[in-house]
Image (cartoon, grey):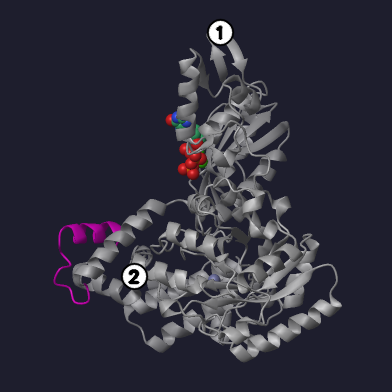
Amino acid sequence: MTNADVARVFDEIADILEIKGADGFRVNSYRRVARQIDDLASDINEVAARGELAKLPGVGKSSAEKINELLETGELKMRGELLAEVPESLLELLKVPGLGPKKVALLWRERSINSLGDLKQAIEGGKLADLKGFGKKSIEQMSHGIAFLESSAGRRRLGTAWAVGTRLRELVEAMPGVRRVEHAGSLRRGCETVGDLDLLCVADDAEGTIKAFTELEDVTQVLAAGGTKGSILYQYRPRRSMQVDLRIVSEESFGAAWQYFTGSKEHNVRLRELAVKRGWSLNEYGLTEGELVIASRTEEEIYAALDLPCPPPEFREDRFEFDLKEIPTDLITREHIRGDLHMHTVASDGVNTIEEMARAAKKLGYEYICVTDHSASSAIANGLSADRLSKQIEEIHAINKRLKGVTVWAGSEVDILAGGKLDFPDELLAELDFAIASIHYGMGSDIKENTQRTLEAMQSPYINVIGHPTGRLLTRRDAMPLDIEAVAKEAARTGTALEMNSSHHRLDLKDQHARLARDCGAMICINTDAHATDQFEEIRFGIVTARRGGLLKGDVVNTQTAAQIRKFVERKRSG
Ligand code: DGT
Ligand code: CA
Ligand code: CA
Ligand code: ZN
């Protein structure tokens, strides 16, 4: 079990206890343990092996015993006992935005609501009208929350899908007689969430490969197993599974199959129409005219036969790709990125030191990084006071003197307060090399207010990027309403960049918004918001999202050299 798995169980226990109406002190002690483990920089299994669990702050002897039980057996007796008294399906109700344990308990006790289905029915039947604490507005919010949950149900964030997909691809590649394995479907297109994984494979023994696939360790269910297609539920961590489809195709028709199963469906429909117009047909075996195969071996040949340039998979959504005469040669790639300008260290809520982040960046070949810990108002994230930030600036200057090969800039992720005011005074911001401003609190539902707050922050000569502009958390929290066009135009006018936050929890701006912003003249900054050195890798998700928006090298701030970025900062400061 990972740290996150263990943390989730403790959080769940706290939820169940709270639904049961247990003492707040007791509930909090489980929450504290969950947080502690989630934030832990080292592997909980190693801490347990060293017998040091009880040394963790907030973890007492009895919690340590429970963690050990979990790590050893994968289960917790206490959890089972609690679930004998409270239906487990109540836990899914907690995922509805705005529904906490107290309200869930009320729904359960007063209205016998046990599940999402029950809740939906109760709302539709007007059965909550006279329930205390459930006003008209809060019922409306619940309805939105349920719709949001349903729309993301069963889908996984790109980062999760990518990790699981990579593991499965390696497993299939290692099977005897397998000659080629490729990702298709939404993962290949780089969609922000993925329903199921689609793998294509060339193999000497189709049936044997399908059999081995369905017999992989961690397969919890075989949905289909034929001569050339297998479909499984694959458990990638406790209680979390994904559907994976594997298709065996021939080398001669690989291109046609890859094109077809990459999709999207909308893209394929358009492409097939173009083929049909010429009296041809197109399917997963090839582009054909009667018996004659026109193209099938590669995707390029298929598109070329239809007089189209072969669009990168990220473009294939029937948005703009059919209007392109050629594919831009300077479409953004990871190799263009020269540095990362948004990251957190131990000073706020990160797990690595400035120096560790710098060395990791240097290893990636980056030219520069900017340290942007949280500002004071983000108290939960241990935001820096003005005093601590001043000291950090000095520390960074000292690190630059001894560390060669990568430049570290002093920055901040400054909170945008209510009304658009910034969390630090100008005199302090002026000491920084570069600064991001983000909204973390008070994201309202009023588009005017959100937009105004963002526009106001951009007026500061010291703010160079608006961080994660819409504040969405994929599969958990919707974007706050924001007039992207107004924000992008003002960004262009003031020389402020908008962030493409690469964290797979955010991907904010999203693809189409990044495109719109670029078209309005705004620059985009692709950052990771890394809270640990290994999160620098998440840049891949920001890149793929930027590519989906058709962003070019020249649209992205951090493809520029350090000297150019200094000029970018100077230009804004000198008005
Ligand atoms: P997902 O899994 O929901 O994230 O999205 P996809 O795009 O991976 O969809 P999936 O797995 O159902 O199918 C993979 C691809 O196969 C899809 O992108 C296009 C192709 N495909 C599936 N069904 C159809 C269809 O009925 N017509 C056409 N033209 N293509 C299809
Ligand atoms: Ca799929
Ligand atoms: Ca599929
Ligand atoms: Zn942030």
Q: Residue furthest top?
A: 291
SS class, disc 2: loop
Q: Residue 98: which numbered mark, if any?
A: 2
Quadrant location of the N terminus in the rendered image? bottom right
The picture places residue 458, in percent across and down from the top left corner, at 51, 70
Identified by mark 1, the residue type is Glu
Dot 2 or dot 1: first in sequence order is 2
Q: Which residues are magenta?
A: 113-134
Q: Which residue is mark 1?
A: 291
Residue at image x 35%, y 83%? 22
Residue 224 in view, yes or no = no
SS class, disc 1: loop
Residue at image x 69%, y 52%? 334
Q: Nearer the viewer, residue 112 or 198?
A: 198
Q: Nearer the viewer, residue 495 or 558?
A: 495
The quarter holding residue 28 reads bottom left
The picture places residue 328, in percent across and down from the top left corner, at 64, 39
Tag 2: Cα neighbours inside 10 Å, few (<14), some, or many (≥20)?
few
The picture places residue 27, in percent across and down from the top left corner, at 42, 83
Q: Residue furthest bottom?
A: 387
Quadrant location of the C terminus in the rendered image? bottom right
Alpha-carbon distance for marks 2 and 1? 59 Å
